[in-house]
Structures are given as structure tokens and as C-alpha cells.
Amino acid sequence: MKTAIIKQHGAPNEPGVIMFEERPTPIPNANQVLVRVRACGLNHLDTWVRRGVPGHTFPLPMIPGSDIAGTVEKVGSAVTKFKPGERVIVNPSLSCGHCMQCDSNRHQLCPQWGLLGETSDGGCCEYIAVEQRQLYHLAPSISFEQAACIPVAFVTAWQMLVKKAAIQPGQTILIHGAGSGVSVASIQIAKMFGLQVYVTSSSEEKLSRAKSLGAHRFINTSKESFRDAVRNLTGKQGVDVVVDHVGEPTFSDSVRSLKRGGVLVSCGATAGSRIEIDWKMIFFKNLALMGSTYGSNGDFWEVLQAFERGKLSAVVETTVKLTDLPKAHEQIESRGVFGKIVVVFPA
Ligand SMILES: [Zn+2]
């Protein structure tokens, strides 16, 4: 089968970094299903796996790609829920399935937790063998391209907003970086739950696209400070919730933009993670700062159902061929993308 493999850390087009190789098609074991990949969505995570993170070891060489949709090609002898030809989506979360955390629907806290495309081979290839319990039937109303935008962005955003911040109708929420996959998902989930949604971006075009998703207030950070804008928009009160996956440049003002009792949730720090904080603000204002990584299998179900009911939908910026992967990584890193880039495979 055709694969894209990250052989070593480096720039997208550097020789020997992203390589295209033939590999044997995996043979599913008794409990596994062989999925023919039709679409694999890309995330910022893919660029971290390729670039490398200081102090962290990725198991290279590795096939990247966490968000996978396709059809069942072959099933193992103990597989009962799936038949060849069926349309499916893969939950990329790897957990043991029988520890206290897994049994408590906190799979992301399992000691053995991992993610396809981050801790083991992902979906930037023609076929992948996954455990039956990682697989879900895909409703006819959801295209492969749409499905390939669901797991990382929407499950992460769902866990942050619905489970951690426990969002409520009528609350205000500030979402940074309007164009990112997690932000697009957060805007829609916040809208779905009846919040007033404030978004930031340095691009007028991204703000206007956020408007089409249902955001209510738009802060162009190339023209004004978001902290001042939030103060003005909320009558000095601040917002109930901030979603900040930017990190260093925004964190301090994000905390200052919260009202008393507010919650900051974060699933990343794309612009740096060394943060200084005046702790007085946290206890005086009764703030909560919450970190988050992906979500539980229950979150996956809830997000998938919201897609089936048409409550959520993905924004696909563009589809590309597998061999365009280096260019797609460049596009993600240039932050010129609104929504997702999806690698598609011919039928
Ligand atoms: Zn477990």
C-alpha cells in the first residue's frame, strides 16, 4: 500500500523528512478491522509530530494522521459489529479499555492512553488495521471528508467546553484564533449550547467566516487589544469562558478577560508555553485554569450524534492528495487555513 511516513524531524520539504513508501497492507488480527482509508484530516498535531517537540520523543518513523474515515475492507475472526463495505469513522484514541479511568469514561486519562498518528501509525496511507472498539458506523449524511474533520478538533473542543468548562446557555465565551480546527469546532459547540460567542483573529477574512458559523462578536487583534475589546463588549465584566490554545502571547490577557468565577480552558500552546502569571488574579477572582487533551469515548459518541443530527458540521478548506502532504503541512504552519485540510484517496 501507499504510505506517507515521517522519517525524521525537520521542515516539510526537507529531504528525508516526509517520505512516500510502499509498505505491506496490514493484516487484521482476530479483534481488528482493516479499514480502507478514504479521507484523513490533518491537524496542527501532525506538524508537531513532524517538527518535533523539545523534551518529547515521538516514535519515528511513523505514518501521521489521526482523523480517519473509510470503508471496511476485511474483518478479523472475532469481529461481530462490522461487515466489509460498510462506511466507518475511526476513534483515534488508544486506551486499555478496562482500567478505572476507562470504566469511568475518562479514556484520555488512561495510563496507557495514546493517539493514532501521534503515538502509533495513523491514517496517511491506503489501509489501517484498528481494534473493533475504535470503530463507529458512519451515517450516510456524513461524507468521508466531513468525518475526517471530526475526532481531534471536535472531540477536543467538546471535552473542553461541555465537560471541563460546563458551558451554559446565556454565558459569554472568548475563542482565540478563529480559523483553527479546534476554534471552528468550539464556535459551533458554543453556538449549539446558546452562548454569546466572541472570536479573535488578525485576519478580517477569518472573522467574517467565523460570522458565517454563528459567532456574535469579532475582535481583530491586528487593530485592537482583545482585552480592551472584551472589557468594552462586556461592560468591564469579562467573559465566562476563554478558550486559549495560543499560549504565551495571549495567556495573561486571556486570564484578565475572565469575569469572576470564570474558566480558562486550553488544549495547546501553539505560540509558546512558557507563561508568567500573577496568581493573585486567580484566587481573588475565583478563576479556574483547566488543561485538556482530546476527550473520552463518550465525547466521541456525543459529537458523532451532533453531526448526524446536523447540529455540527466541519469546515473543509481544501482536499489534497497524499503526495501533497508536505505542501499541506506548510499551509497549516502559515496559518492561512480556515478549518481543515483533508487528504483524500480515490474510491
Ligand atoms: Zn484504561
Image: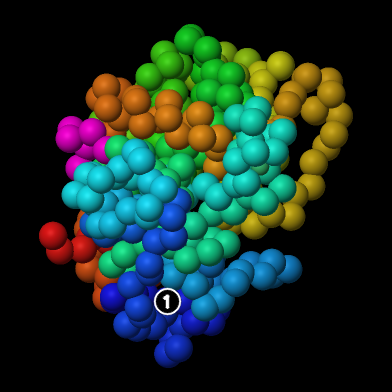
Residue 317 versus residue 155: which sits nearer the camera?
A: 155
The location of residue 195, given as percent across then percent down, is: 45, 16
Q: Quadrant for ligand 1?
A: top right
The location of residue 180, given as percent across then percent down, is: 42, 47
- What residue sits right under mark 1 in the picture? 5
Q: Amino acid at mark 1?
A: Ile
For the residue labelled by badge 1, is the local secondary structure a helix, a strand or a loop? Answer: strand
Q: Is residue 132 left or right of residue 249?
A: left
Residue 121 appears in the figure: yes
The location of residue 72, given as percent across then percent down, is: 26, 52
* Furthest-top residue in this view: 170
**At x 55% / y 42%, what residue is drawn?**
294
Identify the coloring: rainbow
Mark 1: few/some/many CA within 10 Å (<14, 14-19, 20+): many
Residue 160 versus residue 21: which sits nearer the camera?
A: 21
Q: Is residue 182 left or right of residue 38?
A: right
Residue 132 within the magenta-colored segment of the rendering: no
**At x 38% / y 19%, what residue is drawn?**
192
Residue 281 versus residue 91: which sits nearer the camera?
A: 91
* Furthest-front residue in this view: 77
From the Cβ of disc 1, is ligand 1 less than 8 Å away?
Answer: no
Picture quarter with the N terminus: bottom left
Q: Is residue 117 left or right of residue 164?
A: left
* Furthest-left residue in this view: 347
The quadrant where residue 282 appears: top right
**At x 43% / y 26%, what residue is drawn?**
302
Stretch in magenta: 138-144
